Amino acid sequence: MAVAFKGFQFNLPFASILLILLLCLQSGGGQKKKENMLAEKVEQMMEWSSRRSVIRMNGDKFRRYVKAPPRNYSVIVMFTALQPQRQCSVCRQANEEYQVLANSWRYSSAFSNKLFFTVVDYDEGADVFQQLNMNSAPTFMHFPAKGKPKRADTFDLQRIGFASEQLAKWIADRTDVQIRVFRPPNYSGTIALALLVSLVGGLLYLRRNNLEFIYNKTGWAMAALCVVFAMTSGQMWNHIRGPPYAHKNPQNGQVSYIHGSSQAQFVAESHIILLLNAAITMGMVLLNEAATSKGDVGKRRIICLVGLGLVVFFFSFLLSIFRSKYHGYPYSFLIK
């Protein structure tokens, strides 16, 4: 069977082959264009990354280099609000840890074009926040090389904290890229320890002829209580996880000092718990003093009432915080 067009005659199989060739040429041209676009995007990202470890992005850059295909690289984005008028202290703390992590990746021997660190500030990309329905900062998200971000691609900052080591572990789970965190030298701990040793050594030298204070039970008891309060309030957890001091809602400006989950806490929360435990302990000490001392009866009664008041009120406060974190806990006392 043949088909004629204005004096030309083609066999049907020949026309089909010609059509297939045209489609292949068009597909090849589109693939070539896509490859060129990808190469241009990777080159641009590498150029920005060579200037600074964390690439700053506005709405247009985010949509072009992070959201739009083609893309064969993963992108970690920190959504934040660093401008002074936002008064987001947590954002500044998280940004410091983020910079440490990005620098560790940028200057490691394993650095490649498969992973980039970027930041979108609210004042430079408010449209991005609206597009993603994001109403809090800071937030860390991973945009994979293929497909859309899943739930696990959003870092659980409230539960884990924003320490560089925790971020590196999360990135390894999402991208299989291992980042060894290198922190800049920090001699503050060494200096503080040297000052403490010097102070203790100087005190012992000045009191070298009278060292009876070493055997003072009250002094050792106070020191032991300080250690106990620090540990029971979660200071070690803060040191390991690096949680924010508090959380400020960027929409209404409300500051939260108590974390709403039993799996996490803020630094301010540990300070509050420490003070509550100290007040309860002071009340117990006063109750014991009122019961064991042999002074004036009226004075002892006053000490007993003050001690009882401290124990009852601050224990009620402590129990109310426990209820707010462990939802469904049925018991309360004075304060709900």
Image (cartoon, rainbow, N blue to C red):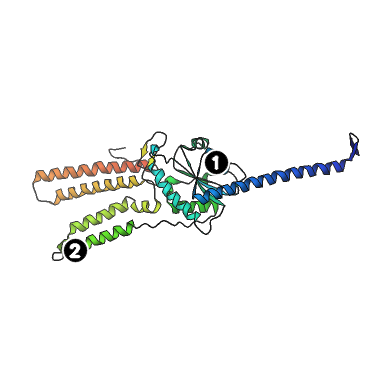
Label 2, secondary structure: give it: helix
Q: Residue at x 11, y 44 (%)?
A: 299
Question: Residue 61 bears which disc, if any?
Answer: 1
Instruction: Name the element at disc 1.
Output: helix
Q: Position of residue 225 (x, y in %)?
A: 25, 54
Q: Residues within 10 Å of mark 2 (few under 14, many from 20)?
A: some
Q: Confirm whether residue 261 shows in the render.
A: no
Q: Is residue 49 visible?
A: yes
Q: Are marks 2 and 1 in contact (CB under 8 Å)?
A: no
Disc 2/disc 1 C-alpha distance (Å): 63 Å
Q: Quadrant of residue 82?
A: top left
Dividing the picture into quadrants, the one containing residue 14 is top right
Q: Which mark is residue 264?
A: none
Q: Residue at x 73, y 46 (%)?
A: 28
Q: How many marks?
A: 2
Left or right of 215 on screen, residue 137: right
Query: Which residue type does callout 1 highlight?
Result: Lys
Looking at the rendered image, the disc whose residue lies closer to the viewer, 2 or 1, is 1
Quarter-wise, where is residue 327 in the image? top left
> x and y percent of residue 142 in the render?
52, 46
Q: Nearer the viewer, residue 173 or 66?
A: 66
Q: Quadrant of the C terminus?
A: top left
Q: Is residue 36 left or right of residue 117?
A: right
> Looking at the picture, which amino acid does disc 2 mark?
Leu
Q: Residue at left 59%, top 41%?
A: 68
Looking at the rendered image, the quarter that the N terminus falls into is top right
Q: Earlier in the sequence, mark 2 or mark 1?
A: 1
Residue 232 pos. (x, y %): 31, 52
| Image disc number at residue 204 | 2
The one nearer the camera, 319 or 3, is 3
